[in-house]
Structure formats: C-alpha cells, structure tokens
Image (spheres, rainbow, N blue to C red):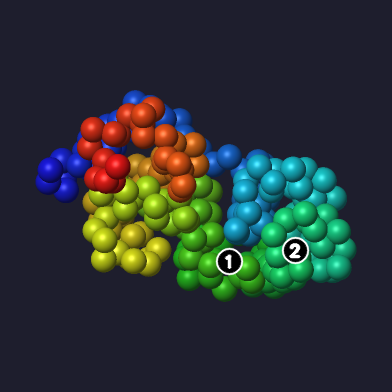
Amino acid sequence: MRKKELYTKVITYFQEAMPDAQTELHFETPFQLLVAVILSAQCTDKRVNMVTPKLFEDFPSAEVMAESTPEVIFEYIKSISYPNNKAKHLVGMSKMLLSDFQGEVPSTLENLLKLPGVGRKTANVIQAVVYDKAAMAVDTHVFRVSHRIGLVPKHCSTPYSVERELVKNIPSEIIPLAHHWLILHGRYVCLARAPKCETCGLLGICQRKI
C-alpha cells in the first residue's frame, strides 16, 4: 500500500471512530494545562488528574505559584513521578512566565522551550491544544503506534524524526486532532505489551507482524 493511501485510510478511520478526541488531562486555563503536561512526563494522566484539583485550587495561576517554593509544591505532587524535579520546574516556570511573558503561556515553540521543565513534547502539546497549531507531540504512544501502523519508516528512530514524518504527511488542519488519535489509540487499543488487535479497526492495514 502506498504511503498516501495508508495515511488516507488511517485518517478516515480515526475521523469516524474518534471525531472529538481530546486530551484526558483536566484543566481550565493554559497555565493549568502547562502544569498538568509537565507533571505527566513519565506519569499517567489518571495519576496527574488525581493530584491537580487541590494543586489548582491553591495555586490557580502563575502569579500564585511563583510565590511558593519547591518544598511546598512537592507536598502536593509527591505521588507523581520525579516530584522533586517537577516541583522545582513548576516554581521556576511560573517565575519565568511572570518575568519574561507577562504571566501568559507563550504560543511559540522557541519561547515555550525556554521554560523550566518544558521539552519539545510538552511545547507541542501546548501549541496544539491551546493555540490549535499544527504541532505533533510525540510521546511513547505516538511513537509506538506510528511505527506499528506503518505511518513512519523503521529508520525514524527518534521522537523528532517521527514528528517530522507525521507532520509531513498529515494535513496541517487536523494535526492537533491526530495527536490525540494516536495517543488514545496507543493508550487503549495498541498497547505496548498486549495490543488488542482483535478489536482494532486498523487491523486490516496495520503493518505490525502478528
């Protein structure tokens, strides 16, 4: 199957199966989403969503969080993976938002990457979800699913190479949605160790060797 045909079939399937796919992280403001995505690194969204209600209640904005300390924030997020580093990142990120960006979450990759705790994946999530930009965040789910389905060649061995390949082949206007398609498919169907191939609507075109 030609690459263009494969992408067309995959996109058509997801448009029908998950027309309203969105992040499973709970948030109300761009700042809260940024906090949640930083916390979600190597941690499940479910766990993050258990922690953030109280955190957001007491620290609803960059202005409030910037006045706190990593030691205080740690107590709120200690059940999250790498809580010490993430507590430092959250306070540092909040301070930089105030000092460099008037308290607003920036919209460009360049400026987002300046923030403590923000890597390319996190920056792309913010660009896609908050600003509806054609940014593809590649986490472990997106990386795995893209290879298994055959959307990217085997030599795409880094998240950045996968990102570039997906962005090149998916229409820009649906990239923010496609990001969620691939994550949710990997989270609930195309599992790492025991993929649910028997219930997968892409089984007929998937390149994975059973």
Q: Label 2, label 1: how many angstroms apart (C-alpha)?
A: 15 Å
Disc 2 versus disc 1: nearer the observer? 2
Q: Residue at x 58, y 66 (%)?
A: 118
Checking the image for residue 18, the label placed there is: none
Q: Earlier in the sequence, mark 2 or mark 1?
A: 2
Does residue 198 show up? yes
Does residue 183 show up? no
Left or right of 201: which side holds 184?
Answer: right
Q: Secondary structure at mark 1?
A: loop
**Structural crowding at the residue carrying mark 1, measured as other residues with C-alpha within 10 Å and reported as few (<14), some (14–19) or many (≥20):** many
Q: Which residue is mark 2?
A: 83
- Tally of marks: 2
Look at the picture and state if 69 lies above or below 170: below
Q: Quadrant of the N terminus?
A: top left
Left or right of 116: which side holds 88?
Answer: right
Percent position (x, y) of residue 188?
49, 37
Q: Residue at x 30, y 34 (%)?
A: 202
Q: Quadrant of the C terminus?
A: top left
Kind of residue at badge 1: Val
Q: Residue at x 60, y 59 (%)?
A: 41
Q: Residue at x 81, y 68 (%)?
A: 70
Q: Which residue is mark 1?
A: 118
Kind of residue at badge 2: Pro
